[in-house]
């Protein structure tokens, strides 16, 4: 196999030049009769053996030198086992998967991994008879060029040349399933080949399972990762120390991950419209540090900008910048909705006592210092503007909901409202089940409350386990066991695990294996369910009840205050605030395009259920996107960042890929860099051999000189 | 009577042969072809005979033996001493000189790279002269046969003029021509004509010609072998020469060598053609020169060894040396 076979042909033809030169430069002999020719013949016989050997050696060395020069210029390539097998097979169905995830933009050596991957993939997209191929430019979606393998190799090569790196992570599972579907349609008897060109990043490919591919598939993994992972320092996430409220100072927490083996010092710069901050942080090897930047917004409204690492020389510059979008609000508003009387010492009582400011406090604090606006209402007052404008509803001691009421709660959740529900008996189980049925797949709790009379017998239950990694128990830190040790829970309902819900959403469980507290997304909003009868529990009398509630409320309203942007490759579905008259008046601006005021293609905005929804199935370009009306007012702002999972550039080892993940398939791992070096070695060796031939020629002439 | 061209370009009208340059021989007129050995001659001459006679220069005494000629008794010694002694006198006789010319094709080597003849025969054997009238000038570089012809013509002239007898034989593949010894002018002219008529032949078998010659020799004398000795029958040649030597002939090897035989011509590529059907050889002479010198030296040594083994004198003659000069030195050397 040669990269330029035509040069080889020309070179081999040129190898005959020494022969021609020999004949053309041979002196014309002088004819002469000679009486002593017998002595000339004797001398020739004596000399011939010596000189014929010399002539043969010299001619061979010259021809070999020219031939080797031609071979070097033709760039010889070793034919791989795959190619040999392909050449022998009659029908080939080949799927070439090009990893286009963010980590492929890392500079590994002289070029990016993606450039090396494209070069390696192009070797497998050469024309062959009876070859049907397809190309997957895989990131968050499979990115297949054709629906079925095609013989249009030219178009595949063109698409390969046009391929770009995405900011998203690769969805290995969906990609392998899509490849499997295409191989499933291959004709019987065809040889099925899957060539995956990737860096086989550990964080992505550890979930790969090649068992989904047909049993007879030959899988070749072409790795473009170097022997050692390149150093990378990136902004992992950006958080706020508290709710972004106008006039209240808070801190912007920038988590910076150092994915290198050296301690790094980085300069972090914040630029959010008129706010600019700088900070320096030293990060140990293979660790994360948080850079704290104090910030205060005086006015409410949307704020956007970027945080980036200045002069950070690492392998992947794309993750050194992080978009920030903050919705600054005047304060947090909550509504405690209950049917219980104010004197009943149930959930509403304890929550009201804790959240409602006392009259003395109210007189001491002015309006600007009020951290939250809390009202207590009955379910019949749900339509009042104060309740509708609240950020959080807290429901306790509720009777069974009417369908209309359920619909209103579901609609409120769909628009992004949050709900803390205190469940104490079977009516609460019925209400939550009705809400689940009303919202469909939009609300999938991890457990289902079982409506039964058993709740009356539940008492003195202890906290069995709790999630210390997330709010609210995260705030207790290492004193969590001590804090919950004396809690005795009574009432509530037994629970049953559901298949759709995530187990990670369960925050605490009780000694009877029922769930005490869980969280779940509901439409654009969020629900937390506290499964306890506060009147029969001692929870409300414990000091830990206050941070428990505050942290729970904070987790529920976190979406309003978090600056965490959407991750590239994951769908964005947002319900726009009410008050927008026409879709035609809206446009989406990207932060860098704000000055030009030109709308960009970023999903679409559709009207649904008397509200407007912004739907962007696959955001791919990081940045800040704003939806503005015709007056230029920002209705919604959203940040899109590259997937943090792509920041760690370590790759899976060969044995993991070939054994643990292979699923019994024939998986071969080759290094693209080795292939290139091998090719280089061949032409370098050819040049060296040519020089050796020239030296051998001179040595022969010197040794056999007359 | 024909004419010849002298080295000065003047035609010698009195010369009986184109190979006889009388003006060149003026300096050698006083010299005689001699031999340090005693000879057997048929007639009286200037050379010491093997036999003791009754006249001539007194040599010594010998005791009388019955049957001796009483006319040679020294009567005075008998009278004084009463003993019988015979007086012995050295007889003088004439010398027989027999040049034998090797007329094989190799003797025509002249070192010329272009063909001489224009016809088909000339193209096939360019070294072969097609016309008898094409007598080369002795002033230029002669081929070995021409050199031998000039040399023999001059020698015959000197021998016959001194009253000695001269003959001539030409040998190629066999004995081609032979003319017995004679000393008359008429005999000399026949020898000159015979020299003019020599043509080279492809074969070179000296031993066979010598055997044939041996059967036709009747007297004794000095045999001059003018040849390049490029022969294959070395053993047979040695045997034939031993027989001639046994007959009492004195043999002298005149080994003719062309300068380009001693050392190959300068240049790079040559296509050598054998002159006796030995094929064609293309080679680079610069690469062969050293090996060739060794090989030709071996040949010279071999010829010298043959001469030594048969009791013959050996003289190597280069055709680069004018034949007159060579002849003069030869005569001086012979005169002792």
Image (cartoon, rainbow, N blue to C red):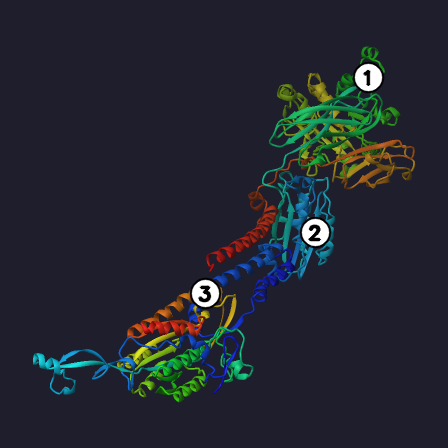
Extreme bottom residue here? B186
Name the chain letter of the residue that bears numbered label 1: A
- Dots 3, 2 in contact, CB < 8 A: no
Name the chain letter of the residue that bears numbered label 2: A
Location of residue A204 by image quarter: top right
Marks 1 and 3 share the same chain: no
Q: Residue B71, relative to residue A702: is it above or below?
A: below
Residue under circle 2? A135
Looking at the image, residue A261 sits to the left or right of residue A272; the answer is left
Mark 1 to mark 2 CA distance (whole Å)? 59 Å
Disc sitting over residue A370 in the figure: 1
Mark 3 to mark 2 CA distance (whole Å)? 73 Å
Q: Nearer the viewer, mark 1 or mark 3?
A: 3
Seen from the viewer's position, the closer of residues A609 and A169 is A169
Seen from the viewer's position, the closer of residues A278 and A239 is A278
- Per the image, label 1 sits on a secondary structure element best described as loop
Q: Tell me if mark 1 has few (under 14), some (14-19) or many (20+) residues whose alpha carbon lies within 10 angstroms of its own.
A: some
Extreme left residue here? B82
Residue drawn 65% across the image and 53% down it: A123
Residue under circle 3? B289
How many numbered markers are drawn?
3
Name the chain letter of the residue that bears numbered label 3: B
Asked whether residue A421 appears in the rendered view, the answer is: no
Residue drawn 44% across the image and 82% down it: B202
Asked whether residue A17 appears in the rendered view, the answer is: yes
- Per the image, label 2 sits on a secondary structure element best described as strand
Seen from the viewer's position, the closer of residues B25 and A259 is B25
Q: Locate residue A189, reporting x and y percent.
A: 62, 61
Residue drawn 80% across the image and 26% down it: A393
Looking at the image, residue A681 sits to the left or right of residue A416; the answer is left
Disc sitting over residue B151 in the figure: none
Q: Tell me if mark 3 has few (under 14), some (14-19) or many (20+) residues whose alpha carbon lies within 10 angstroms of its own.
A: some
């Amino acid at each position: 196999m040669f990269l330029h076979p035509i040069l080889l042909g020309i070179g081999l033809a040129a190898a005959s030049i020494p022969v021609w030169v020999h004949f053309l430069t041979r002196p014309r002999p002088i004819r002469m009769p000679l009486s002593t020719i017998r002595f000339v013949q004797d001398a020739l016989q004596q000399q011939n053996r010596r000189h014929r050997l010399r002539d043969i050696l010299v001619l061979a060395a010259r021809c070999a030198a020219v031939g080797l020069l031609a071979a070097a210029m033709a760039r010889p390539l070793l034919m791989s086992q795959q190619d040999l097998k392909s050449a022998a097979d009659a029908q080939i169905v080949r799927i070439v998967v090009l990893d286009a995830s963010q980590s492929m933009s890392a500079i590994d050596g002289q070029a990016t991994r993606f450039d090396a991957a494209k070069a390696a993939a192009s070797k497998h997209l050469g024309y062959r008879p009876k070859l049907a191929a397809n190309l997957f430019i895989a990131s968050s979606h499979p990115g297949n060029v054709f629906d079925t393998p095609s013989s249009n190799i030219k178009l595949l090569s063109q698409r390969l040349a046009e391929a770009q790196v995405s900011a998203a992570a690769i969805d290995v599972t969906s990609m392998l399933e899509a490849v499997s579907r295409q191989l499933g349609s291959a004709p019987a008897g065809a040889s099925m080949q899957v060539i995956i060109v990737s860096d086989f990043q550990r964080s992505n490919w550890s979930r790969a399972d090649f068992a989904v591919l047909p049993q007879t598939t030959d899988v070749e993994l072409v790795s473009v990762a170097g022997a050692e992972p390149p150093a990378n320092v990136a902004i992992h996430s950006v958080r706020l120390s508290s709710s972004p409220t106008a006039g209240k100072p808070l801190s912007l927490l920038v988590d910076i991950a150092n994915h290198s083996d050296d301690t790094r010092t980085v300069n972090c710069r914040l630029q959010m419209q008129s706010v600019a901050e700088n900070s320096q942080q030293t990060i140990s090897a293979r660790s994360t540090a948080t850079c704290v930047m104090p910030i205060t917004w005086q006015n409410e409204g949307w704020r956007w900008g970027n945080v980036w690492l200045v002069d950070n020389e690492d392998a992947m510059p794309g993750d050194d910048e992080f978009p920030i979008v903050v919705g600054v609000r005047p304060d947090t508003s909550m509504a405690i909705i209950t049917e219980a009387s104010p004197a009943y010492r149930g959930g509403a009582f304890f929550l009201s006592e804790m959240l409602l400011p006392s009259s003395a406090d109210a007189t001491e604090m002015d309006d600007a210092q009020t951290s939250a606006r809390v009202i207590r209402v009955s379910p019949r007052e749900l339509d009042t503007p104060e309740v509708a404008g609240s950020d959080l509803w807290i429901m306790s001691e509720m009777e069974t909901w009417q369908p209309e009421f359920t619909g209103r709660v579901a609609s409120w959740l769909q628009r992004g409202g949050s709900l803390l529900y205190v469940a104490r008996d079977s009516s609460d189980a019925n209400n939550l089940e009705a809400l689940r049925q009303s919202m469909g797949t939009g609300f999938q709790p991890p457990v289902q409350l079982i409506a039964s009379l058993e709740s009356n017998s539940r008492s003195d239950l202890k906290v069995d386990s709790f999630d210390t990694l997330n709010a609210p128990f995260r705030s207790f830190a290492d004193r969590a066991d001590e804090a919950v040790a004396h809690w005795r829970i009574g009432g509530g309902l037994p629970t049953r695990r559901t298949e759709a819900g995530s187990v990670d959403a369960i925050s605490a469980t009780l000694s009877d294996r029922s769930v005490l507290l869980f969280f779940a997304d509901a439409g654009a909003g969020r629900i937390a369910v506290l499964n306890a009868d506060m009147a029969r529990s001692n929870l409300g009398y414990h000091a830990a009840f206050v941070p428990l509630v505050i942290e729970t409320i904070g987790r529920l309203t976190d979406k309003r205050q978090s600056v965490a942007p959407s991750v590239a490759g994951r769908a964005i579905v947002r319900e726009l605030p009410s008050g927008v008259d026409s879709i035609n008046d809206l446009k989406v601006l990207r932060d860098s395009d704000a000055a030009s005021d030109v709308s960009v293609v970023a999903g679409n905005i559709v009207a649904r259920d008397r509200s407007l929804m912004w739907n962007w199935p696959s955001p791919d370009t990081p940045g800040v996107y704003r939806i503005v009306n015709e007056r230029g007012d920002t209705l919604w702002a959203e940040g899109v960042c590259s997937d943090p999972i792509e920041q760690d550039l370590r790759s899976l080892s060969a044995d993991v890929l070939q054994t643990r993940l292979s699923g019994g398939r024939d998986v071969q791992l080759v290094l693209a860099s080795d292939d290139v070096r091998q090719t280089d070695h061949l032409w370098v060796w050819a040049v060296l051999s040519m020089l050796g031939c020239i030296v051998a020629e001179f040595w022969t002439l010197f040794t056999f000189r007359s | 009577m024909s004419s010849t061209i002298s080295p000065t370009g003047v035609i010698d009208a009195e010369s009986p042969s184109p190979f006889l340059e009388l003006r060149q021989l003026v300096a050698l007129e006083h010299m005689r072809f001699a031999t340090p050995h005693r000879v057997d001659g048929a007639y009286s001459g200037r050379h010491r005979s093997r036999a003791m006679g009754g006249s001539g220069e007194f040599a010594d005494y010998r005791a009388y033996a019955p049957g001796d000629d009483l006319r040679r008794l020294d009567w005075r010694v008998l009278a004084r001493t009463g003993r019988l002694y015979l007086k012995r006198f050295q007889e003088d006789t004439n010398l027989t000189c027999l040049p034998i010319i090797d007329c094989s094709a190799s003797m025509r080597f002249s070192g010329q790279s272009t063909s001489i003849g224009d016809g088909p025969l000339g193209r096939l054997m360019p070294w072969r002269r097609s016309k008898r009238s094409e007598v080369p000038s002795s002033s230029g570089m002669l081929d070995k046969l021409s050199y031998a012809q000039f040399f023999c013509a001059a020698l015959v002239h000197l021998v016959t003029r001194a009253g000695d007898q001269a003959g001539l034989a030409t040998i190629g593949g066999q004995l081609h021509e032979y003319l017995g010894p004679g000393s008359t002018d008429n005999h000399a002219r026949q020898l000159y004509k015979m020299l003019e008529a020599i043509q080279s032949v492809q074969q070179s078998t000296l031993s066979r010609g010598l055997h044939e010659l041996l059967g036709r020799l009747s007297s004794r004398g000095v045999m001059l072998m003018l040849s390049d000795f490029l022969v294959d029958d070395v053993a047979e040649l040695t045997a034939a020469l031993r027989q001639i030597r046994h007959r009492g002939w004195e043999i002298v090897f005149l080994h003719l060598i062309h300068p380009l035989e001693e050392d190959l011509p300068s240049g790079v590529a040559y296509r050598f053609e054998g002159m006796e059907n030995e094929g064609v050889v293309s080679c680079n002479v610069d690469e062969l020169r050293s090996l060739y010198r060794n090989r030709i030296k071996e040949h010279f040594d071999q010829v010298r060894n043959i001469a030594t083994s048969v009791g013959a004198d050996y003289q190597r003659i280069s055709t680069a040396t004018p034949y007159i000069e060579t002849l003069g030195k030869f005569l001086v050397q012979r005169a002792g």
